[in-house]
Image (cartoon, rainbow, N blue to C red):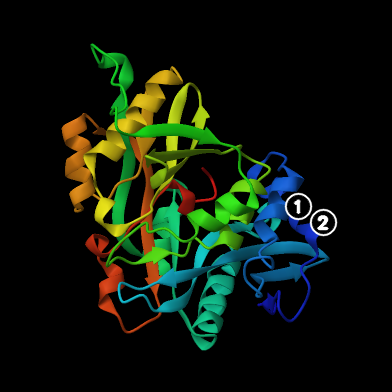
Amino acid sequence: MPEVMFSWENPVPFGNVISSWSAAFGREIDVKAMEWWFDTTKYFAESLAAYIVEDGIIACFYAISPRVLIRPSGEKQKAGLMNIGFTHPKYQGKGYYLKVNVEMHEKLKEMGYACIFGFANHNSHYSYRKYLGWIDLAVLTNFKLDLSQQKTKKKAKADLQCSELAPCDSLLEDIARTVVGLDKYHLERSETFLKWRLLDSPIRKYRFMRIEESGKPWAYVIFKVYNKEMDIMEIFYREEQYINNPQVFECMVGKAGELEVSAINLWSNLQSEEHLVLEKIGFKEEQFSTFFGVINFSESAAINELRNWHYRFIDSDVY
Protein backbone atom coordinates (compact mmCIF):
# COMPACT_ATOMS: atom_id res chain seq x y z
CA MET A 1 0.00 0.00 0.00
CA PRO A 2 1.50 3.39 -1.01
CA GLU A 3 2.33 5.99 1.63
CA VAL A 4 -0.18 8.71 2.49
CA MET A 5 1.21 12.23 2.16
CA PHE A 6 -0.07 15.34 3.90
CA SER A 7 -0.29 18.85 2.52
CA TRP A 8 1.48 20.46 5.50
CA GLU A 9 4.47 18.18 4.90
CA ASN A 10 4.44 17.84 1.10
CA PRO A 11 2.93 20.60 -1.09
CA VAL A 12 -0.09 19.40 -3.04
CA PRO A 13 0.59 19.09 -6.81
CA PHE A 14 -2.43 21.21 -7.68
CA GLY A 15 -2.43 20.51 -11.42
CA ASN A 16 -2.48 16.78 -10.77
CA VAL A 17 -5.43 17.20 -8.40
CA ILE A 18 -7.41 18.94 -11.15
CA SER A 19 -6.76 16.21 -13.72
CA SER A 20 -7.49 13.36 -11.30
CA TRP A 21 -10.69 15.04 -10.11
CA SER A 22 -11.90 15.35 -13.71
CA ALA A 23 -11.09 11.68 -14.33
CA ALA A 24 -12.95 10.62 -11.17
CA PHE A 25 -16.12 12.60 -11.86
CA GLY A 26 -16.12 12.54 -15.67
CA ARG A 27 -16.35 16.30 -16.10
CA GLU A 28 -14.24 19.42 -15.91
CA ILE A 29 -14.04 21.45 -12.73
CA ASP A 30 -13.95 25.20 -12.46
CA VAL A 31 -10.27 25.83 -11.69
CA LYS A 32 -11.06 29.12 -9.93
CA ALA A 33 -13.52 27.29 -7.68
CA MET A 34 -10.93 24.65 -6.80
CA GLU A 35 -8.34 27.34 -6.02
CA TRP A 36 -10.87 29.13 -3.81
CA TRP A 37 -11.64 25.95 -1.85
CA PHE A 38 -7.96 25.55 -1.06
CA ASP A 39 -7.26 29.21 -0.36
CA THR A 40 -7.97 28.84 3.35
CA THR A 41 -4.72 30.43 4.51
CA LYS A 42 -6.47 33.81 4.57
CA TYR A 43 -8.79 32.38 7.20
CA PHE A 44 -6.83 29.63 8.90
CA ALA A 45 -3.10 28.88 8.78
CA GLU A 46 -3.33 25.17 8.08
CA SER A 47 -3.93 23.55 4.71
CA LEU A 48 -5.46 20.13 5.29
CA ALA A 49 -5.24 17.48 2.58
CA ALA A 50 -4.14 13.83 2.47
CA TYR A 51 -3.30 12.09 -0.77
CA ILE A 52 -1.60 9.15 -2.44
CA VAL A 53 0.57 9.49 -5.54
CA GLU A 54 1.14 6.47 -7.74
CA ASP A 55 2.81 6.43 -11.17
CA GLY A 56 2.96 10.23 -10.97
CA ILE A 57 -0.85 10.42 -10.67
CA ILE A 58 -2.94 11.61 -7.73
CA ALA A 59 -4.48 8.20 -7.07
CA CYS A 60 -6.58 9.32 -4.09
CA PHE A 61 -7.26 12.69 -2.49
CA TYR A 62 -9.11 13.96 0.59
CA ALA A 63 -9.28 17.56 1.79
CA ILE A 64 -10.67 19.27 4.88
CA SER A 65 -11.47 23.00 5.00
CA PRO A 66 -10.46 24.37 8.43
CA ARG A 67 -13.16 26.07 10.46
CA VAL A 68 -13.49 27.44 13.99
CA LEU A 69 -16.18 25.80 16.11
CA ILE A 70 -17.93 27.93 18.73
CA ARG A 71 -19.13 25.83 21.65
CA PRO A 72 -22.35 26.73 23.55
CA SER A 73 -20.08 28.13 26.27
CA GLY A 74 -18.42 30.47 23.77
CA GLU A 75 -15.13 28.53 23.78
CA LYS A 76 -13.44 28.20 20.39
CA GLN A 77 -12.11 24.90 19.06
CA LYS A 78 -10.63 23.61 15.82
CA ALA A 79 -13.07 21.98 13.41
CA GLY A 80 -13.18 21.22 9.72
CA LEU A 81 -15.56 20.87 6.79
CA MET A 82 -15.20 17.57 4.92
CA ASN A 83 -14.69 19.08 1.52
CA ILE A 84 -13.28 17.20 -1.47
CA GLY A 85 -12.59 13.48 -1.77
CA PHE A 86 -12.10 11.15 -4.72
CA THR A 87 -10.19 8.18 -6.09
CA HIS A 88 -8.85 8.15 -9.65
CA PRO A 89 -10.73 5.46 -11.66
CA LYS A 90 -7.47 3.62 -12.34
CA TYR A 91 -6.95 3.00 -8.61
CA GLN A 92 -10.47 2.32 -7.37
CA GLY A 93 -11.10 -0.84 -5.37
CA LYS A 94 -7.68 -0.83 -3.67
CA GLY A 95 -8.76 0.66 -0.35
CA TYR A 96 -6.91 3.93 -0.90
CA TYR A 97 -9.80 6.20 0.06
CA LEU A 98 -10.35 4.48 3.40
CA LYS A 99 -6.61 4.67 4.09
CA VAL A 100 -6.29 8.43 3.45
CA ASN A 101 -9.40 9.14 5.52
CA VAL A 102 -8.30 7.06 8.50
CA GLU A 103 -4.79 8.51 8.53
CA MET A 104 -6.06 12.07 8.07
CA HIS A 105 -8.47 11.69 10.96
CA GLU A 106 -5.71 10.38 13.22
CA LYS A 107 -3.61 13.43 12.33
CA LEU A 108 -6.52 15.77 13.08
CA LYS A 109 -6.93 14.22 16.53
CA GLU A 110 -3.23 14.79 17.19
CA MET A 111 -3.58 18.40 16.02
CA GLY A 112 -6.37 19.08 18.52
CA TYR A 113 -9.40 19.13 16.25
CA ALA A 114 -12.70 18.70 18.12
CA CYS A 115 -14.60 17.36 15.13
CA ILE A 116 -15.10 17.51 11.42
CA PHE A 117 -18.53 17.88 9.87
CA GLY A 118 -20.00 17.47 6.45
CA PHE A 119 -22.95 17.57 4.10
CA ALA A 120 -23.07 14.25 2.28
CA ASN A 121 -25.01 13.17 -0.78
CA HIS A 122 -26.40 9.69 -1.37
CA ASN A 123 -23.19 8.57 -3.07
CA SER A 124 -20.88 9.32 -0.13
CA HIS A 125 -23.15 8.88 2.90
CA TYR A 126 -22.95 5.08 3.05
CA SER A 127 -19.17 4.83 3.18
CA TYR A 128 -18.83 7.72 5.66
CA ARG A 129 -21.21 6.09 8.11
CA LYS A 130 -20.17 2.47 7.49
CA TYR A 131 -16.41 2.91 7.69
CA LEU A 132 -15.38 6.36 8.93
CA GLY A 133 -17.23 7.00 12.18
CA TRP A 134 -19.74 9.43 10.69
CA ILE A 135 -22.58 10.29 13.09
CA ASP A 136 -25.81 11.40 11.45
CA LEU A 137 -27.23 14.59 12.90
CA ALA A 138 -30.09 15.03 10.44
CA VAL A 139 -31.46 14.66 6.96
CA LEU A 140 -31.70 18.29 5.89
CA THR A 141 -34.45 19.48 3.58
CA ASN A 142 -35.16 22.87 2.11
CA PHE A 143 -37.40 24.78 4.53
CA LYS A 144 -39.45 26.69 1.99
CA LEU A 145 -41.99 29.49 1.89
CA ASP A 146 -43.86 29.32 -1.41
CA LEU A 147 -44.71 32.94 -2.12
CA SER A 148 -46.71 32.01 -5.21
CA GLN A 149 -49.31 30.36 -2.95
CA GLN A 150 -49.88 33.47 -0.87
CA LYS A 151 -53.10 35.27 -1.70
CA THR A 152 -51.66 38.64 -0.75
CA LYS A 153 -48.03 39.65 -0.64
CA LYS A 154 -46.75 40.53 2.78
CA LYS A 155 -45.29 43.96 3.35
CA ALA A 156 -42.66 44.88 5.86
CA LYS A 157 -43.84 46.30 9.17
CA ALA A 158 -44.19 50.06 9.02
CA ASP A 159 -41.80 50.58 11.94
CA LEU A 160 -39.06 48.51 10.29
CA GLN A 161 -37.02 49.47 7.27
CA CYS A 162 -35.40 46.92 5.00
CA SER A 163 -32.66 47.96 2.60
CA GLU A 164 -30.16 46.19 0.39
CA LEU A 165 -26.52 47.18 0.89
CA ALA A 166 -23.42 46.88 -1.23
CA PRO A 167 -20.81 44.71 0.53
CA CYS A 168 -17.74 46.44 1.92
CA ASP A 169 -15.17 45.90 4.65
CA SER A 170 -16.98 48.07 7.20
CA LEU A 171 -20.24 46.18 6.63
CA LEU A 172 -18.56 42.81 7.16
CA GLU A 173 -16.89 44.17 10.29
CA ASP A 174 -20.29 45.20 11.64
CA ILE A 175 -21.92 41.89 10.74
CA ALA A 176 -19.10 39.95 12.42
CA ARG A 177 -20.03 41.59 15.74
CA THR A 178 -23.58 40.19 15.63
CA VAL A 179 -25.18 37.01 17.00
CA VAL A 180 -26.33 33.99 14.99
CA GLY A 181 -26.92 31.26 17.55
CA LEU A 182 -27.31 31.33 21.32
CA ASP A 183 -26.14 28.38 23.42
CA LYS A 184 -25.52 26.31 20.27
CA TYR A 185 -22.57 24.78 18.49
CA HIS A 186 -21.96 26.84 15.37
CA LEU A 187 -19.15 27.78 13.05
CA GLU A 188 -17.47 31.13 13.58
CA ARG A 189 -18.57 33.90 11.20
CA SER A 190 -15.53 36.16 11.58
CA GLU A 191 -14.92 39.13 9.30
CA THR A 192 -12.11 37.25 7.54
CA PHE A 193 -14.26 34.17 7.02
CA LEU A 194 -17.18 36.23 5.70
CA LYS A 195 -14.93 37.93 3.18
CA TRP A 196 -13.48 34.60 1.98
CA ARG A 197 -16.84 32.82 1.96
CA LEU A 198 -19.07 35.54 0.52
CA LEU A 199 -16.99 38.10 -1.36
CA ASP A 200 -14.17 35.97 -2.74
CA SER A 201 -16.36 33.09 -3.92
CA PRO A 202 -16.14 32.56 -7.70
CA ILE A 203 -19.21 30.31 -7.60
CA ARG A 204 -22.03 32.57 -6.39
CA LYS A 205 -22.85 36.22 -5.91
CA TYR A 206 -24.34 37.06 -2.54
CA ARG A 207 -26.49 40.01 -1.49
CA PHE A 208 -26.77 41.83 1.83
CA MET A 209 -29.95 43.06 3.49
CA ARG A 210 -30.23 45.19 6.62
CA ILE A 211 -33.37 45.39 8.76
CA GLU A 212 -33.49 48.37 11.09
CA GLU A 213 -35.72 50.61 13.16
CA SER A 214 -35.04 54.35 13.37
CA GLY A 215 -31.52 53.81 12.10
CA LYS A 216 -30.77 51.05 14.62
CA PRO A 217 -29.97 47.68 12.98
CA TRP A 218 -32.04 44.74 14.13
CA ALA A 219 -30.66 42.12 11.77
CA TYR A 220 -28.62 41.46 8.64
CA VAL A 221 -29.67 38.86 6.09
CA ILE A 222 -27.23 37.34 3.59
CA PHE A 223 -28.97 35.80 0.59
CA LYS A 224 -28.69 34.87 -3.04
CA VAL A 225 -31.31 34.65 -5.76
CA TYR A 226 -31.17 31.48 -7.83
CA ASN A 227 -33.81 30.27 -10.30
CA LYS A 228 -36.11 33.06 -9.07
CA GLU A 229 -35.93 31.79 -5.49
CA MET A 230 -34.26 33.46 -2.50
CA ASP A 231 -31.81 31.29 -0.54
CA ILE A 232 -31.09 32.62 2.95
CA MET A 233 -27.42 32.02 3.71
CA GLU A 234 -27.54 33.38 7.26
CA ILE A 235 -29.44 35.78 9.52
CA PHE A 236 -27.31 37.88 11.85
CA TYR A 237 -28.89 39.62 14.85
CA ARG A 238 -27.60 42.86 16.27
CA GLU A 239 -28.84 42.18 19.76
CA GLU A 240 -29.64 38.88 21.41
CA GLN A 241 -33.20 39.81 22.39
CA TYR A 242 -34.20 39.97 18.73
CA ILE A 243 -33.50 36.28 18.13
CA ASN A 244 -36.62 34.66 16.60
CA ASN A 245 -38.49 37.95 16.49
CA PRO A 246 -41.34 37.36 13.99
CA GLN A 247 -41.07 40.92 12.71
CA VAL A 248 -37.58 40.24 11.36
CA PHE A 249 -38.84 37.25 9.39
CA GLU A 250 -41.91 39.09 8.16
CA CYS A 251 -39.73 41.97 7.01
CA MET A 252 -37.51 39.50 5.16
CA VAL A 253 -40.58 38.01 3.47
CA GLY A 254 -41.77 41.47 2.51
CA LYS A 255 -38.43 42.22 0.86
CA ALA A 256 -38.66 38.94 -1.05
CA GLY A 257 -42.02 40.04 -2.38
CA GLU A 258 -40.50 43.30 -3.62
CA LEU A 259 -37.80 41.31 -5.44
CA GLU A 260 -40.55 39.19 -7.07
CA VAL A 261 -39.01 35.87 -6.17
CA SER A 262 -41.30 32.84 -6.06
CA ALA A 263 -40.01 31.25 -2.84
CA ILE A 264 -37.65 31.57 0.12
CA ASN A 265 -35.41 28.66 1.20
CA LEU A 266 -33.23 28.14 4.26
CA TRP A 267 -32.05 25.52 6.73
CA SER A 268 -33.59 25.79 10.17
CA ASN A 269 -33.09 23.39 13.08
CA LEU A 270 -36.34 21.46 13.55
CA GLN A 271 -35.84 21.46 17.31
CA SER A 272 -35.44 25.24 17.57
CA GLU A 273 -37.95 27.92 18.52
CA GLU A 274 -37.11 29.62 15.22
CA HIS A 275 -38.56 26.66 13.30
CA LEU A 276 -41.94 27.18 14.97
CA VAL A 277 -41.90 30.90 14.23
CA LEU A 278 -41.19 30.21 10.56
CA GLU A 279 -43.85 27.49 10.40
CA LYS A 280 -46.42 29.99 11.61
CA ILE A 281 -45.43 32.34 8.79
CA GLY A 282 -45.96 29.49 6.30
CA PHE A 283 -42.59 27.78 5.81
CA LYS A 284 -42.78 24.03 5.11
CA GLU A 285 -40.12 21.32 4.90
CA GLU A 286 -39.72 20.29 1.27
CA GLN A 287 -37.41 18.01 -0.77
CA PHE A 288 -34.21 16.28 0.38
CA SER A 289 -31.19 18.55 0.45
CA THR A 290 -28.34 16.67 2.15
CA PHE A 291 -27.23 14.47 5.05
CA PHE A 292 -25.69 16.51 7.88
CA GLY A 293 -23.24 14.71 10.13
CA VAL A 294 -20.08 14.88 12.23
CA ILE A 295 -17.04 12.78 13.04
CA ASN A 296 -16.41 13.57 16.68
CA PHE A 297 -12.83 13.56 17.97
CA SER A 298 -13.67 15.14 21.32
CA GLU A 299 -15.04 13.80 24.58
CA SER A 300 -18.21 15.88 24.25
CA ALA A 301 -21.25 13.79 23.34
CA ALA A 302 -23.26 17.01 22.94
CA ILE A 303 -21.69 17.50 19.50
CA ASN A 304 -23.59 14.40 18.36
CA GLU A 305 -27.04 15.90 19.01
CA LEU A 306 -28.83 18.04 16.40
CA ARG A 307 -30.67 20.08 19.02
CA ASN A 308 -27.31 21.55 20.06
CA TRP A 309 -26.46 22.95 16.61
CA HIS A 310 -27.10 26.12 14.64
CA TYR A 311 -26.45 25.73 10.91
CA ARG A 312 -27.26 27.52 7.65
CA PHE A 313 -26.47 27.33 3.95
CA ILE A 314 -23.36 29.42 4.65
CA ASP A 315 -21.77 26.39 6.33
CA SER A 316 -21.78 24.39 3.08
CA ASP A 317 -19.66 25.99 0.37
CA VAL A 318 -21.85 24.34 -2.27
CA TYR A 319 -24.53 27.00 -1.69
Rendered location of residue 267, percent (x, y): 34, 44
| Residue carrying label 2 | 15
| Residue carrying label 1 | 18
Rendered location of residue 183, percent (x, y): 27, 67
Tell me the kind of residue under disc 1.
Ile
Closer to us: 23 or 139: 139
Q: Are marks 2 and 1 in contact (CB under 8 Å)?
A: yes
Rendered location of residue 314, percent (x, y): 48, 50
Count of numbered badges drawn on the protein = 2
Q: Which mark is residue 152?
A: none
Tell me the kind of residue under disc 2.
Gly
224 with respect to 59 (left or right): left
Q: Secondary structure at mark 1?
A: helix
- The residue at the far front in this view is 214
Q: Quadrant of the N terminus?
A: bottom right
Question: Gap in Å between the C-alphas at discs 2 and 1?
Answer: 5 Å
Give the answer, above or below, for where 102 lies relative to 111: above
x 48%, y 21%: residue: 228
Closer to us: 76 or 291: 76
Q: Is residue 133 visible?
A: no
Q: Is residue 300 visible?
A: yes
Give the answer, above or below, for where 114 lies relative to 93: below
Rendered location of residue 193, percent (x, y): 58, 60
